[in-house]
Image: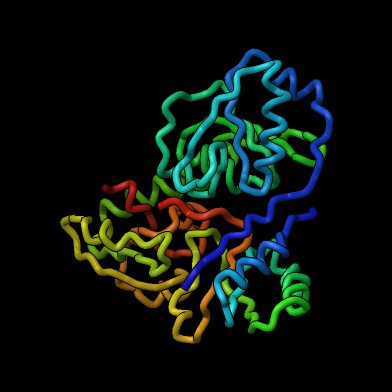
Amino acid sequence: MEYDLEIDKIISKIKENSAKNVLLQLPDGLKPKAKEIVDSLRKELDVNLFIWSGSNFGSCDIPLHLEKLGIDLILHFGHSRFVK
Amino acid sequence: MKIEYFEARVKIELPEITQELIDLVKDKSVALLTTVQFLEQRASLAVKLLKYCKIVNMKLAHCKYPDQILGCSAFDSEIPENPDLFIYLGGGVFHPKSLILKEVADEVYCLSPIDFSIRIITKEHVSSLIKKRNGALSGFTIAKNIGILITTKPGQNNLKKALELKADKNIYYFLDDTINFAELENFNFIDCWVNTACPRIAYDDSIKIGKPIINIGELI
């Protein structure tokens, strides 16, 4: 299945947020695409890119306490914003 | 810390509508639900099906878009008008199964976006989960020591609800981010678990837990 990974939009969002340490959180089905996404972003941006190896069951499942590590932006893939 | 969402919409063209699909929907009111990935394909299919049936739009709980479904949506949604037919456009049965578990639908027609093949899921497909849930409810009734599971995940955190539960039992509160079922086995004094995190845990993961587990929504 081919997915629209919106690489251009990701780049502009990272720039817009002036992010330096960025975390990619992918659901299991998209985890194999992590290399493609990181490689594409590295060509365009000088930022630290981290891949969350834990779960991404939905947009209700956002990692916590990453500010302590200096992560300033989470790119959450595969879900729309969770409406509480 | 900012969060940006990238929905990873699928890039495929749907096949031509089949006679089987036309016969299925003809003159009925149809809820056509899908995941965020297939919303564009769902919209184009709905336009084509309007010639044959009435499409009922639904806004389900926790969803950003109409006619989108999440694994937990059915548990917190009020469905004002039940359509004649529920169709789920997408792969797998995780999402549509929730409609049966919550008794919103007796059956759901799962439509493959690749070839429009149809797979029907019914109560029979989830009967073992429903039996286990009914057993768990009995387990709660006779339990003396209750463990309430609370996740720290912002989207699934229901601390307030957890503290609202009053029962003539000994209540203990447990915190974790992702609930670790193996760890729960260490608390062998708990007779029954009450889940306040994702409602699917009490169904799909109940086989991983030795003790009965029910959702807080079934008590409050």
For image coordinates 45% across by 69% down, the residue present is: B179
Please state the horizontal and vertical placement of residue A33, each as a whole percent of the image: 75, 68
Location of residue B174 by image quarter: bottom left
User: Which residue is found at the position 28% from the left and 48% from the top?
Assistant: B219
Q: Is residue B38 above or below residue B119?
A: below
Q: Does the image show residue B122? A: yes
The colour mode here is rainbow
| Numbered marks: total | 0
Q: Residue at x 37, y 62 (%)?
A: B157
Where is residue B203 drawn, in percent x and y?
48, 52
Residue B107 position within the rendered picture, expressed as x and y whole percent measured from the top left? 58, 31
In this image, B141 relative to A70: left or right? left
Which image quadrant is residue B45 in?
A: top right
- Given residues B190 and B59, the one toward you in this image is B59
The reply, left or right, for residue B76 in relation to residue B163 is right
- Return the residue found at the far top: B27
Tell me if residue B181 can be seen. Answer: no
Location of residue B95 with respect to B124 vertically, above or below: below
Considering only vertical position in the picture, is B93 above or below A66? above
- Which residue is farthest bottom? A69
- Residue B196 image position (x, y, % from top left): 36, 58
Frontmost residue, B27 versus A83:
A83
